[in-house]
Amino acid sequence: MVARAAKGSRKARQGFQRGLVARGQWVDREGAHRPVPRGHAEEITVNGEAEPVTMKLGVWASNTKSRRDKLDQEQRVALREPGMQWV
């Protein structure tokens, strides 16, 4: 049971990091002032992968915002950098 919790935690952190990469690409292209539409997907390159991965950035941003009370301090700081004012 402990191994599952650690694996889930690692997977959640990996997903959060992918979301940050996708958000960074969005901000570089569209600017921090423009909100991400919920249906938007962003292709990102993940370390070690030959093909880009599609990240559902709009869903990630919406879910992250609705769960912001559960974010740790490190995650909150990371979200402020790409211009997410609601953090």
Image (cartoon, rainbow, N blue to C red):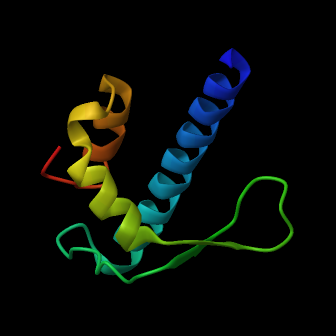
Q: Residue at x 31, y 33 (%)?
A: 71
Q: Where is the N terminus found, in terms of image quarters?
A: top right
Viewer-proximal residue among 18 and 71: 71
Q: Is residue 56 left or right of residue 47?
A: left
Q: Nearer the viewer, residue 6 or 2?
A: 2
**Residue farthest toward the left in the current orientation of the protein:** 86
Residue at horizontal 20 percent and vertical 76 percent from the top: 34
Q: Quadrant of residue 45?
A: bottom right
Q: Is residue 3 above or below residue 55?
A: above
Q: Quadrant of the C terminus?
A: top left
Q: Is residue 25 above or below residue 2?
A: below
70 relative position to 9: left or right? left
Residue lying at the far front of the rendered structure: 1
Q: Quadrant of residue 11?
A: top right
User: Residue 51 location, x and y as percent?
Assistant: 81, 74
Numbered-mark total: 0
Residue at 48% x, 79% y: name it: 41
Residue 12: % across, % down: 54, 41
Left of 73 or right of it: where is 45? right
Q: Is residue 72 above or below residue 79?
A: above
Residue at left offset 72%, top offset 73%: 52
Q: Position of residue 33 (x, y in %)?
A: 17, 70
Q: Residue 28 occupies which quadrant of the picture?
A: bottom left
Where residue 27 sits in the image (x, y, percent)? 35, 68
Say whether residue 49 is left or right of residue 77: right
